Amino acid sequence: METKKTICDWIDENKDEVFAISDYLWEHPELSMQEYEASQKVADLLEKYGFLVNRGVAGLPTAFAAEYGSGKPVLAFSSEYDALPALSQNKDSVVRDPVIDMAPGHGCGHNLMAVGGVLAAIALQRCMIEQGLAGTIKVFGTPAEELCIGKPFMARGGLFEGVDAFLDWHPSHRNRAAACDTNAYFNVKYHFSGVSAHGNAPWNGRSSLDGAMLMGHAVEMLREHIEPGSKDSPTTLNYAFPDVGNSFPNVVPASTVIWCVGRMKNAEMAADVLSRLDACAKGCAQATGTTVKEEVITATHDMIPNLCLGQLIEENLRYVGAPAYSSEDQEDAKKIQKAMNAKETGYSGKIEHTVLSSQPVTDSSEYSWFAPIAFLNVALAPSEDAGWHSWTSCKFAGSSVGKRVLETAGKILALAGYDLLTKPEILQEAKAELKERLCGKPYQSLLPENAKPDLTTNKAVMERFR
């Protein structure tokens, strides 16, 4: 326990450096795939502490892979830094109060996640140096978590191979080890192309909109034949028409896009539904005399939970304790709960027991197919009904609460990493559990070989607000 106290003391003495980066990211939010400043600042910090940083990996300009040490075990931490659109919020207000109207904001706390794992990695590195411990620390900078783009392309590029355990976290309304499964996910566009013509002689054209609309109807029919999933992880298949080649009814449109997003029970179901969507697209194109091209934006696996590492996280969560919310934090929390028509309970500080459960889609699920994953939740919002992906969570992420959450997460992950370095039996048990849960299934990327990350996503919006 003396070493754990030393690790926590180091974080207490050095946390202001990462707080400053978190504050900067909160004040300069960048949307998915446009996180140039964020990724640079985080990578620069790791280089300052002696990590070897490889930037722009897997064809992603805002991704990086950092490494320190040598040999086994190989422990990996994660960094996410993308913001959300239109969530700008004054951190000192308890009502909706944008700093800049319609500008991005950190409504998911990724300004904290950008450096929480980094803080843990550096603290663990300092301990390794002092005690002469063998092992390798990796930190993966993963862009576009909100679109689930970064990690699938990094996984396909082989960056996660050879890792022995992943230590990850996410702000929440709970303090717990999230030993959770998730749905698999895909995000795909179908580009229909036809022949334009005058509206008074439509027989001379071939309507791309007809093809896309017919596919929309096919998706409606397909939904009935997809297993519904569970209450916590329902399967969903949604679509929209974000782009039609013209907006004038007197012209037969030559190009139309239908955009489909699916959340499926597991990777096998996601692959099956994607193949059926492809069949729908081809059939609808043939029926309307058009052509269609598939564009897979991303596709992620379901998460493989690990109860062994969950229990390790809980042990260290109880050692560190929940964030020390101040009376001002509690007062703000109750005001926001009132504004959201929620019970005015404030922060409970409760630490939950580790149980297998489900959570929403996250591309951290890709990690879990390569090595056991430890996943931590720390309460940034006071309750589930106080809002998430909203101005409320953006306010908390930029306030003193965010700093308390960041500090708590850094300590817990660093201590769990120390346990894995010094107690190999825990890692052996976690790996055995992963092997049992995978049942021999290998990792196979759900991305087509020709799929490339969309580097222009959100570029126009960021050019407006940067």
Image (cartoon, rainbow, N blue to C red):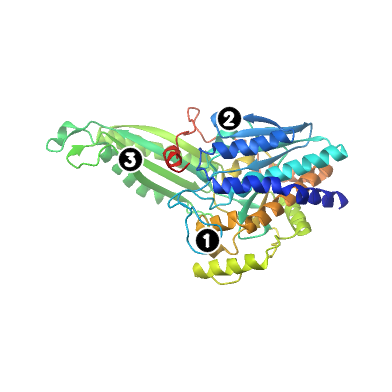
Q: Which mark is residue 387?
A: 1
- Amino acid under disc 3: Asp
Question: Mark 2 Cα within 10 Å, few/some/many (few <14, many 20+)?
Answer: some
Q: Earlier in the sequence, mark 2 or mark 1?
A: 2
Question: Which one is closest to the eye, mark 3 or mark 1?
Answer: 1
> Which label belongs to residue 243?
3
Question: Along the line of sight, which residue is nearer the eye, 439 or 141?
Answer: 141
Picture quarter containing residue 424? top right
The residue beneath circle 2 is 56
Q: Where residue 228 sits: x, y (%)? A: 47, 54
What residue type is disc 1 on? Gly
Q: Residues within 10 Å of mark 1 (few under 14, many from 20)?
A: some
Q: Nearer the viewer, residue 29 or 367?
A: 29
Q: Position of residue 259 (x, y in %)?
A: 39, 42
Determine contact: label 3, label 2, CB under 8 Å: no
Whether residue 69 appears in this view of the structure is yes
Name the residue nearer the viewer: 393 or 23: 23
- Viewer-closest of 125 and 103: 103
299 relative to 253 in the view: left or right: right
> Could you tell me how far apart the alpha carbons at marks 3 and 1 are, in whole angstroms?
31 Å
What is the C-alpha distance between the residues marked 3 and 2? 30 Å
Q: From this view, report whether residue 166 is shown above or below residue 101.
A: above
The image position of residue 309, as x and y in percent, is 73, 49
